[in-house]
Amino acid sequence: MEINGLQRHYELASGVVRALDGIDINIEKGERIVLLGPSGSGKTTLLNCVAALDSPTGGSYSFDGEDVPRNKSEEMTTFRRKNIGYVFQFFNLLQDLTVLENILLIQELSGSRDKQRALDLLQLVGLEKEVDRFPAEISGGQQQRVAIARSLAKSPKLLLGDELTGNLDSKTSAMVMEVLVKACESEEITTIMVTHDENLSKYATRVIRLDSGKIVSDEKVNQ
Ligand SMILES: Nc1ncnc2c1ncn2[C@@H]1O[C@H](COP(=O)(O)OP(=O)(O)OP(=O)(O)O)[C@@H](O)[C@H]1O
Ligand SMILES: [Mg+2]
């Protein structure tokens, strides 16, 4: 992934907000990036631009050698379905579907229904016994593990997480992170995880810090 001079400015009546103000990052396949920075520094904005959920207002961003679509919602959706898995802080599971059905639905949307893979992923995250339960019938940590299995279900090239352990206690958070790292390593999935939690740096191969829409440090971590 190549990001050059990326900008996301908001024109408000009160002036211009420079949420991203010239971001340069090259990311190689398989890197596991933890993105840190104070509240309002631009982390979510960067993740949303990388995911083609939002359109930058300047600079360039290419993925697998191709410019990522912007300002065209259909092309952006196609790009996301093909390439991106996204885990949100609030798990966004559909309450009327079982654990397994939540995963099958995502596969169907990306045109790759594969029940065996869905079951394999649920086993990977340790939920083989809960496949037929509804989200309200499992714990928060288990719901987050379903969300991770779901984000992996369509074999994304890029997995993005925004405060994905933000609602979990430290023990559950460690378990979720270990599951995630294992899955990403075995499938060579590139990850970017946004967090306030410095402790999560230990799961990264690279730590990037943002402040006021700019990168203030970018370091590889020795594993
Ligand atoms: N729709 C919008 N209109 C104007 N400014 C916005 C908008 N969305 C975000 N911003 C501003 O852009 C900046 C970056 O916001 P962003 O959500 O990326 O921060 P963040 O690093 O994710 O913060 P947090 O850790 O609190 O989630 C902030 O100053 C925010 O106020
Ligand atoms: Mg944020």
Image (cartoon, grey):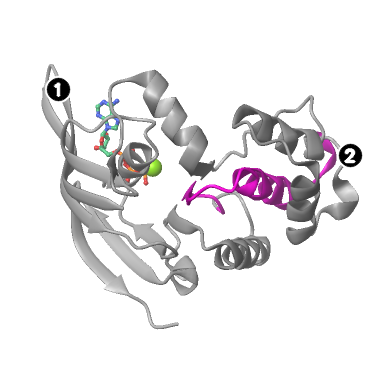
Q: Position of residue 100 (x, y in %)?
A: 80, 39
| Residue bearing mark 1 | 11
205 in relation to 5, above or below: below
Decide: few, some or many residues near mark 1? Use Cα within 10 Å; few <14, some 14-19, many ≥20: few
Write the residue at 67% across / 66% down. Answer: 171
Report, in whole angstroms, how far the alpha carbon at label 1 lies from the one at label 2.
47 Å
Secondary structure of the residue carrying tag 2 is loop
Q: Position of residue 215 (x, y in %)?
A: 20, 57
Q: Nearer the viewer, residue 105 or 145?
A: 105
Secondary structure of the residue carrying tag 1 is strand
Question: Of the residues shown, which amino acid type is indicated by label 2?
Answer: Asp
Q: Is 187 situated left or right of 198 in this image?
A: right
93 in relation to 207, above or below: above
Q: Which residues are magenta?
A: 136-165
Q: Residue 42: in sight, yes or no? A: no
23 in relation to 135, above or below: below
Write the residue at 58% across / 38% down. Answer: 90
**Residue 211 forms part of the magenta stretch:** no
Question: Of the residues shown, which amino acid type is indicated by label 1?
Answer: Glu
Q: Earlier in the sequence, mark 1 or mark 2?
A: 1
Write the residue at 79% across / 28% down. Answer: 97
